[in-house]
Amino acid sequence: MIEIALAGNPNTGKTSLFNILTNSYEYVGNWSGVTVEKKVGMLNNKKGHLIDLPGIYSLNPLSKDEGVATRFLIEENFSMVLNIVDASQLERNLYLTIQLLEYGKPVVIGLNMVDVAKGRGIMVNEKKLSEKLQSPVLPIVARTGSGCKELAGLLTNEKQENKPLYISYGQYLDQAMESLVAKMPEAENLPPKRWLALQFFEGNEVVHSLLKTLMPVEELQRIFAETEKLVQMEEGAKSLSYHIRAVRAEYIKGVLDVSLQKGDEVAYTLTDRIDNIVTNKFLGIPIFILFMYLIFKLTFDWIGSPISDLLDGFLTGPLSDGLTSMLQAAGASAFIKAVILDGIVAGVGGVLVFVPQIMILFFLISFIEDSGYMARIAMVMDKTLESIGLNGKAFIPMIIGFGCNVPGIMAARTIEQPKERLLTIILTPLMSCSARLSVYSLFVGAFFTQNQALVVLSLYLLGIVIALTLAKIFSSTILKEEGSMFVIELPPYRIPQWRTLMRNTWEKGKGFIKKAGTFIFGGSVIIWFLSYSGPAGMGVDMNKSFLALIGGAIAPLFEPIGFGSWQAGAALITGFLAKEVVVSTMNIIYVAPDLHTLQGVMAHHFTSLSAYSFMAFLLLYVPCLATVAVIKKETGSAKWTWFSIIYALLIAYIVSLIIYQGGKLLGF
Amino acid sequence: MVLTDIKAGGKAKIINTEHVNVLVRRRLLDLGIMEGTEISIKRILPFGGPFAVEADGQWVGIRRSEAKLIQVCHS
Ligand SMILES: Nc1nc2c(ncn2[C@@H]2O[C@H](COP(=O)(O)OP(=O)(O)OP(=O)(O)O)[C@@H](O)[C@H]2O)c(=O)[nH]1
Ligand SMILES: [Mg+2]
């Protein structure tokens, strides 16, 4: 089995190719930093594994996702590199290619985006390029799959070793490398020594720490300082890394001189024109809010709700009738019938009803992700975010968080500054995810039929505003700035492809459905059982059940914020598992046969005001279990994990208190 | 002259990036923006917001405070 690492600059189409070659459905989007962890896939011919890595510009990482890729390339075992380069940005892409070639593993180069290059009048002669780089080069279009089959044919393990590319970095540095190589001890599984020496002199952090385990630190420091001084004096370079870069630039120029032809410059007219609007002086932020409003209009009024209603009709009509008669025919006991109909069908079905709406939301988020708008909105938001101690890039995890907080938090890996990254991680859970959408759907259908989209939009904005306010507070107290930075690549706009959109939507939606089949299924059974049993035994009146006892114990706490019933208390406790479980719990405890009856019953337990207060509380209070787990993993700190739970509870209570008491004062 | 002296739509050649924050400079280098690069200003966001610049077909957004530290000359 061969192991092939897929490496290249960010946003060059690595994952698109990975999906084609391994028949996978990994996450593709039109901005830099979509892939943040390594993904392993089996090649279609079953002859090897392909490992998709986050994009990198060089082997010296700056952010955490880049660290994942470089550490893989330096520390792990693999037999070959598949290097994807963007034909329209060849010069910049070749800096990485050269470092990979110097490394000495066999490299196959996939020359991607030849369609984009052609559109800009750039012609690459792949034969000449291949000759110059001494490695196979194949033009492909990963978006359509053209050329990918041929490329797959090159991925064999015929050649295990490759002679490393040798570039002379000038007499002085070459000599320094030689003497450093001579001093390095022998060790297992070490990358080629000259390569290590070169990366060391370039300032590669990963190589630095690797060498530190092999040689005394003082000696390394001394060698570095001496060499830098020598090169500065003799070559007139500003620093070692500048010198190395200049030599590579020269080499690349030599390669491109024979292999690249630039035609007349063609401006990105489409991109230019769209950018004129979406990053407009005054309209930038309003346009973003308008987009969000349209998204909710589509999700609720125009498409989502009607389909959800149909699904509800099916689940509560033919499906439960069918189940009832089947159970009858099978002679099931009253207990079994109650578990299935009142527990599972009510609990799981109650959540499944919202799948159409959630799918539409996911579809629209995927559209934004694949269009190129993501990087623009980050730029439009940068000024605002800078003033509160973050940078524009922090908005990308937040938008992804609208789908699900877990990948949102993962996406924070691309933020270079550790403090800004931490802040983004602990605030992303305030972004209203699709699971919460199912609860809003239930409530707005009952209490705000006229203004569904507007009410939901207000909740999303509430989440954003609270997150921004807290960012300001945290960054000026516990997380003082270390100097913020912001540089973002703005990719050309692309019309998203149906295939990518459908795949991305399905990938995200699948998780939701899976959760319904596992977590929510199990949760529903337990909740039903707790509502069916009590201190007095089985089949008790629900008000005397264990569930009522547990919910009732914390209910008084919620009295001041508008919903002091045991039902609300119980629902909120179960919501910690996953927020949509709140919907299941409500379906079970209000024993309603379908969505509309449930909404009718709820009208007896909530007013519009307390319903809004409940939704705000649900939006803000503790992140769900999966989110807590990923916060723990990404911060690596129990302290920050607890912090994100506790501050969320406090802030939720305060906000709901203001909404409810303030609303009462205003006469709602 | 610095980058912020150029109007939207204008072009310039970078002569010095020494004063720019190290991390930002590293990123710009990654994106092929350094001394000697010709860049054009594509958009300037309002209220002291970022600059969108283009170099060799690559668009990049940077902060105005950083753009102020990049010395340029007419190309
Ligand atoms: N026009 C064109 N677009 C492409 C091509 N290959 C990929 N794309 C698009 O480029 C964007 C980036 O694709 P990804 O596959 O996510 O790129 P990546 O290299 O995995 O990106 P990161 O994970 O962020 O490093 C997507 O919008 C793709 O649809 C191509 O050959 N031609
Ligand atoms: Mg990717």
Image (cartoon, helix red, strand yellow):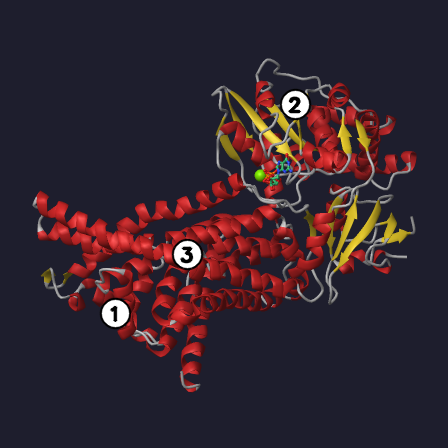
Mark 2 highlights which residue? A107
Q: In whole angstroms, how far apart are the C-alphas of marks 3 and 1?
A: 23 Å
The disc placed on residue A213 is none
Residue at image position (50%, 58%) is A295
Q: Nearer the viewer, residue A390 or A169?
A: A390
Residue A650 image point, x, y percent: 44, 69
A473 lies above or below A59: below
Label drawn at residue A304: 3
Whole-number angstrom distance, CA of label 2 to CA of label 1: 65 Å
Q: Chain of mark 3?
A: A
Nearer the viewer's eye, disc 3 or disc 1?
3
Query: Dot 1: few (<14), some (14–19), or many (≥20) neighbours within 10 Å?
Result: some
Residue A91 placement (x, y as % from top left): 77, 34
Chain designation of label 2: A
Spatial CA distance of label 3 from label 2 is 48 Å
Image height of A426 relative to A46, above or below = below
Q: Earlier in the sequence, mark 3 or mark 1?
A: 3
Which residue corresponds to mark 1? A601
Q: Secondary structure at mark 2?
A: strand
Mark 3, secondary structure of its residue? helix
On screen, residue A461 versus residue A107, left or right, reads left
Residue A632: x percent and y percent? 47, 51
Amino acid at circle 3: Gly
